[in-house]
Image (cartoon, rainbow, N blue to C red):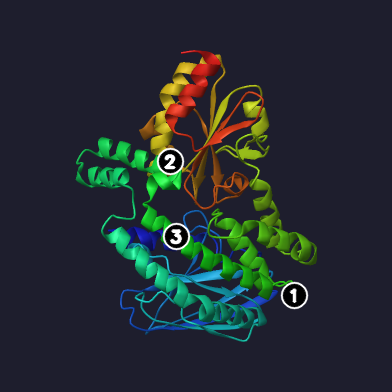
Amino acid sequence: MKKFFLFMALALSLMTGQAAGNQNDSIICHISGTVVDRPDSKYAILLEAGKDFRTSPCIPIPIVDGKFAYTLKDDMPRVYNLTFDDDYGKGMWKTRSFFTGNGYVEFSCGDNKVDKIEPFKSDLDDNILYLKIEETLDNRYANQLETVNAQISPLFDNDSAYTPEVQSLLKQIESTESDEEKDKLKDLFFQYQNGPKENLYSKEYLDLEKKAYEIIWSRDSLKRIMISDTPNLVGLHYIKTALLSNNESWEDIPGYIELFETLYKDNMKDHPYTKEIIEMIEARDVKAGNKYPDYKVTREDGSTEQISSLIKGDVAVIDLWASWCSPCRRHSIELIPLYEKYKDKGFKVVAIAREGGDCKAMNVAMEKDGYPWESFVDLNDRDKVWRINRAGNSGGKIILVDSNGVIVGTDMPIQEILEFLEKKYGK
């Protein structure tokens, strides 16, 4: 059954759009590949790098007699990821990144048992540079990271990566049969994940993680040196990927931003990735103490509002959610009693759903969960709401804004939101 739904989703993606760019045929890229030891793979799948298959059209390419081929037409060179249909069902997300242009890209793809991505052939300068950089980085740092990871993996196998308190919580989650109780325990684990690391992880794990970070920081430093001479699409892709990661520990974000501002921003101003990076840099201001940004939100019928007009003068929760995101929906449901208690005093919930294709699943979820508020929708990421709010490709995010339009906090536990409302409006 899972295979059937996956096939239908892929078929819908193919029907709703073949490539992310404008189809003026100025770029014609011939993509082909040979598949070995992948008997369950029926489609090779292309998706523009940084996008989410749940909200963006992907390109399924049939595999026939162990081979696939596709001619991608676009308005300019971009970065794409190649993966396979059966990887979704296995819970794997092994992708092969490559750059398009007027030329060819040829893959030879094996099974998913190895971590390294197979190199590919191409006559495009961006791909040649990209493969050279990746090979240099792997030769210098791959073995070091593998050594540390080999020490980290057993910690998760025997649960010693976590503190005793979290170990106990995970055992409760595993043994609890009640879905309601399991969801509550998962939310508690989520709070640990978003709290101080020393409350989540053991000292042994944190010491090894620090070693891994040091290796990755050195890797990032060398990577930036290799893209700092001449601005190019490879460098722009690395900068964009670093900002998409939303992880200060794994990427030297300030270093990437400085490189972008000094070398790439003006020299590559005509590429759409440059605008995306500018938006992601601006989104870094979506944090407690800063003014909440203003942007357009869209209703299902196509009418629009500025979010500033929706929250002006009132305490509000910006509830980013999705019909396909169970944790998001649980958090939205938790907001209902708070909304019912304080709505007459000015408290608002501005819900925005991240959906792909159409709004049918959104409407079903709203009726099932009983939301007493309307929901706007960022259909196929057209309004860039998730990028504006620095939510990456996640299902959702909750942001509490005070009556002056200042951000109180993001992804706060429901109890903290309640305490803020009680202080503002009374119990």
Of all residues, the one furthest to the right in this rendering is 266
Image: 7 above or below 163? below
Q: Which mark is residue 328?
A: 2
Image: 306 above or below 4? above
Compute the Cα span from label 3 to label 1: 32 Å
- 353 left or right, relative to 65: right
Image location of residue 54, percent across then percent down: 47, 55
Amino acid type of the residue tagged 3 in the rendering: Glu
The number of discs equals 3
Report which residue position mark 3 lands on: 209
Is residue 154 at all visible to an observer of this figure? yes
Report which residue position mark 1 lands on: 229
Image location of residue 160, percent across then percent down: 30, 55
Amino acid type of the residue tagged 2 in the rendering: Cys
Near-viewer residue (304 or 132): 132
- 355 left or right, relative to 164: right
